[in-house]
Image (spheres, rainbow, N blue to C red):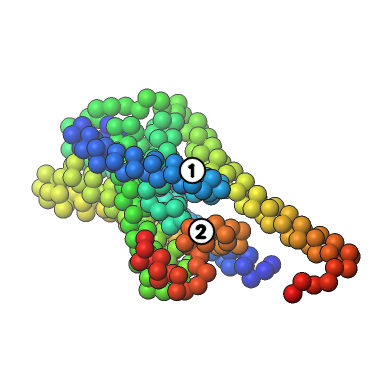
Amino acid sequence: MSRNAKINALLLLAVAALAVLPLVLGLGDHKEEPFAGADAEAETAITEIEPDYEPWFSPLYEPPSGEVESALFALQAALGAGVLAYYFGLRRGRRQGEQRATAASEAASVSRDIPEGD
Amino acid sequence: MHIAEGFLPPAHAIAWGVASAPFVVHGVRSLTREVREHPESTLLLGASGAFTFVLSALKLPSVTGSCSHPTGTGLGAILFRPPIMAVLGTITLLFQALLLAHGGLTTLGANVFSMAIVGPWAGYGVYRLLRRWDVPLMVTVFFGAFVADLSTYCVTSVQLALAFPDPSSGFLGALGKFGSIFAVTQIPLAVSEGLLTVIVMRLLVQSSKGELTRLGVLLTRSGEQKREAVAR
């Protein structure tokens, strides 16, 4: 593994550790619903502050179940990851193509025995 | 940071919508100009939007025992300047509001203001400031993304505290309440976002040197850096 790849792997590992540690250390144990979404907790806090508050508009479409919702979240992540992977793949391919083209043209100029310009 | 559909009183919802609209319109104009003048940047623009898509779908556990998600807006703000992120962030929020019932149309203005406007500008500001002090690129990228992420959630806390001040302790009491839900939860996630943004920026430095130089992220000579910092 190159030094660059090692650093990237270490950075990824740190991100994974930050996500896993709260779970391993049981930091959600004091809650009724451990690791619920902060957005939902805010809704609860609103109803605590203003018990009479009624949301005056409801979503046009709501995923019918948690499964469908997680599928749509996965779709969102997959779309993003797909575009990112396409970008980096394309860049890598282009770079390799350019390198090969320069290598080929250098080889051709050497075989034709053209003297160096500079 | 998604304020749920219908959870802001109409007056607040409209006010945040009015506040956000000019930024998004300005962003659309910057985006079309960027694409017209530099068609080759379309791909990297797509990648920046894609990064926001992935990160805002990742709900991660945090030290407070609840889950939240990064925003991914720092990267695009650093690469293309914040106005562009007003558009890319709005697209992401619309997707989530329409398909996932996450956030909402009535709260879109408020959510756009926190995630697609204040976050990118705050992150970009910190990034520029640190660059001016000759801090190494990856450190500036980390703090830019960190601040973009965290400031977004601070704004959400302020928005909710303005709409729902505590009956006894008022605005500040409510701010403390919402801040402990959002901002504290977000600190480790903002670190994660900073690290992920650094990884993507490192990959970009390897793969897209020319593009980064054109955008002023990579510099050919340190003298040019100073002049560009002044010019921008």
Residue B141: quadrant of the picture: bottom left
Q: Position of residue B94 (x, y in %)?
A: 40, 35
Q: Which residue occupies 67% across, 55% down?
A: A92
Give the amino acid at mark 1: Arg
Q: Position of residue B20 (x, y in %)?
A: 28, 41
Q: Nearer the viewer, residue B170 or B47?
A: B47
Q: Is residue B199 above or below residue B32?
A: below
Q: Is residue A56 above or below residue B19?
A: above
N-term-proximal mark, 1 vs 2: 1
Q: Position of residue B115 (x, y in %)?
A: 35, 47
Residue A109 circle label: none
- Residue under circle 2? B214
- Residue under circle 1? B36
> Circle 1 — which element?
helix
Quadrant location, the N terminus of chain B: top left
Chain ID at mark 2: B
Q: Is residue B151 left or right of residue A80?
A: left
Q: Nearer the viewer, residue B60 or A10?
A: A10
Quadrant location, the C terminus of chain B: bottom left
